[in-house]
Amino acid sequence: MSLHEAVGLRRLQKTYVVPDRTETTVQALEQVSLVIPPATFTAVVGPSGCGKSTLLHCAAGLDRPTAGDVDLLGTRITALRPAQLAAFRARHLGFVFQENNLISSLTAFDNVALPGRLAGRAQPRQKLMDILAAVGMEHRAPLRPHQLSGGERQRIAVARVMASRPPLVFADEPTGALDIGSGEVVIQWLRSLTAQGTTVVMVTHDVGAAAVADTVVVMHAGTIRATVPGGNPKVIEEHLRAVRAPVAGLAS
Ligand code: ADP
Ligand code: MG
């Protein structure tokens, strides 16, 4: 495994063919290349429709790029067969998404237990309950997702990643459906993961959340426009304003 790279995107291209309309294609990613060092927190920002989710889904092996390659932890996942890819994801990757995070037929507890079971590393009940307690959700363990609020579901999704401690964590708008307090808990938890060696990649609309990252990738129209250090929300906002400028009012 390369010591300098946890995630490597090489000239990624993603073309969607819009169903029912012949020849209509959407170029969601155009020649996107990006290297993310291990144990860092990267935020991806940009106007709605610029390709953030497509980038994240291709990087995390949830979707296949039309062209280009993705290397994760030294493995070229774009060369893996579907079963190999599923096994790689189960072993190395964790996800926190805005919605559809949890499996609706399973209780909160079983959702948290699932990744360990899938990876062949089932964990003791008490350890999983301790993790649920860490996100304030131990009293919700027997409930199913539809019995939980959006914020509670997201805390369960966080607990699920905490339980499996994967080396790579991908998050797409993890705070999008949350109140400010729950959102801050999620961002600070993502931030804390890098100290344990985890590499975190997060898509967000929230400039304040992006500023918590080490590096902020600014996208526009399927390309990376800028890569800037985190820390200062004003700097990120300026970059976003620059890419929004030509279609002010339409984008976002
Ligand atoms: P973002 O997350 O930045 O809002 P997306 O990555 O979701 O943007 O989408 C990028 C572009 O690709 C948009 O124009 C979107 O409409 C299009 N797109 C995304 N998914 C599909 C799909 N399954 N079929 C067709 N077009 C899609
Ligand atoms: Mg998106």
Image (tube, rainbow, N blue to C red):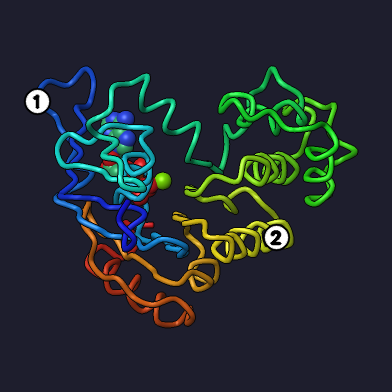
Report the residue at 14% width, 29% height from top. Answer: 24
Label 2: state its secondary structure.
helix
Amino acid, disc 1? Glu
Q: Quadrant of residue 117?
A: top right
Amino acid type, callout 2: Val
Residue 183 in the image: x percent, y percent? 66, 58
Q: Residue at x 36, y 79 (%)?
A: 238
Q: Quadrant of residue 46?
A: bottom left
State the residue at coordinates (19%, 27%).
Answer: 17
Mark 2 or mark 1: which comes first in sequence?
A: 1
Answer above or below: position of 239 versus 60.
below
User: Mark 2–mark 1 contact, CB under 8 Å?
Assistant: no
Viewed as shown, does residue 38 lie left or right of 63? right
Mark linked to residue 134: none
**Residue 45, position in %: x, y?**
39, 61
Write down the residue under mark 1.
23
Residue that numbered label 2 is attached to: 185
Mark 1 CB lies closer than 8 A to ligand 1: no
Answer with the quadrant where ligand 1 appears in the image: top left
Up-down relation of residue 79 to residue 240 (above or below): above
Q: Mark 2 vs mark 1: give the one in front.
A: 2
Q: Dot 1 lies on which element?
A: loop
